[in-house]
Image (cartoon, rainbow, N blue to C red):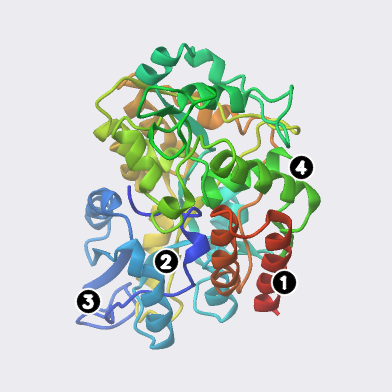
Amino acid sequence: MKQRRILAALAGVAIAGLALTSCASEGGGNGGGDGDVTLTFRTWDTNAQAAYEESFAAFTEQNPDITVDVEVVPWADYFTKLRTDIAGDSAADLFWINSSSYLPYAQSGALLDIADVYGDDFDAAKAEWAPSVVEQFTDDGKLYGVPQTSDGGIAVYYNADLLEAAGVAPEELSELQWAPGGGSDDTLIPTLQKLTVDQAGKTAADADFDANSIAQYGYNAAQDLQAIYLPYIGSNGGTFQDGEKFTFSNPKTVEAFQYIVDLINEYHVAPDAADTNTNGDFSRDQFLQGKMALFQSGLYNLANVADNADFDWGVAMLPAGPEGAVSVTNGVAVVGNAKSDHQEAVNKVLQWLGTADGNSAIGATGANLPAVEGAQDVYRQYWADKDVNLDPFFDVLESGVTIPAPVGENFGAASEGFGPILSEIFLGQLPVEEGLKQADEVANAAIG
């Protein structure tokens, strides 16, 4: 599921797109009765490819005149190619998109309005979809994608062996608190210090700890939008955006960033930003190699951990801040190309993918949590059969308090502007408050 970290990779990626070939097939027509039609469906997730092929095989059994070919474009190239293909009228008939990238295409008329696709059945269908994902793909009252995956909330994966060696009980993790500036109310920093060890076996709590020779990190504090800094901002009562306007200089947001940066550069309980700024998988790989005790992330990394960790591991609740434990939640939708030559067939596929039958295959292997709520039991059962407790990913959402995922027609351009500034902040080369003011200025100038 290297696919994506839908948000974690956002800060470094501009909106872009799919180098797709024209998906018109022999026979032309509109997919309803003028001969056989072959549609193209595009995703960035290799884990999802087989699942969609299974789903579309079932669809074709019911609609023998419509075949759907599944193609994969890697995440690194996906959005760069999408912009090119949309502009050249050569995009796929149906394709995955994330919430920070869909809006320009929706507003330009490139995507189908899902209410038009479903007609009188729209309200009933929408009631079956994860509300948070529906909200992310709704603009000015119109929904532009059929929800396909939901990330649930953010939680903390832990290495049980490293916890035991440090004398930290797994149940302690779900009670961890962080406080701006640290202090007596903060239990996260002392715990992370116990879990961070240098080459000589000294922990970060020891006076003679060598921060230049770390063998084991406690935690993955980093420039990770989805898993790290959005949850910290939210749990401190800060904001990332007000509408489409960026609010990096919100005082509560500044406090949250300062805390994360201090974990790296003052307390040395997380990898140096020189390693994590340019490699979004660095911390995950350190965790999988047994060199990091706690790895804060989402369901999107569950299959990676389950398949590659050769140690005992589990999942705990997100650390709580002054406003409690607050997570972002995210999803992926499939959209219909408004310029496809086969609109009736596209509509039928979108209608299929919005059902439990159409959506359940992507959860059957445990790789993705379906966004059609009636299909989620398959996913939960898969992990229950492996004795994996998913509750922390969902318990964090039960309060109903979340921090919104990024929005905005020009979010890609804004992220290109603020990304390098955040990199300097995390490296300790730019004071947090000063840098976040610059990030605000650059980001808001980019959105006009």
Return the disc, 4 or 3, that comes first in the chain's sequence: 3
Q: In this view, does 120 lie to the left or right of 439?
A: left
Which residue is identified by label 2?
347
Which residue is identified by label 1?
441
For the residues labelled 4 and 2, the Cα–Cα distance comes to 42 Å
For the residues labelled 3 and 2, the Cα–Cα distance comes to 17 Å
In this rendering, the answer to whether 210 lies above or below 163 is below
Return the disc, 2 or 1, that comes first in the chain's sequence: 2
Return the disc, 4 or 2, that comes first in the chain's sequence: 4
Which disc number belongs to residue 237?
Answer: 4
Return the disc, 1 or 4, that comes first in the chain's sequence: 4
Which residue is identified by label 3?
35
Q: What residue type is labelled 3?
A: Gly
Q: In this view, does 167 lie to the left or right of 431?
A: left
For the residues labelled 3 and 1, the Cα–Cα distance comes to 55 Å
Figure label count: 4
x and y percentages locating residue 252 in the rendered image: 77, 46
Tell which of 242 and 376 is nearer to you.
Answer: 242
Task: Give the SS element for disc 2.
Answer: helix
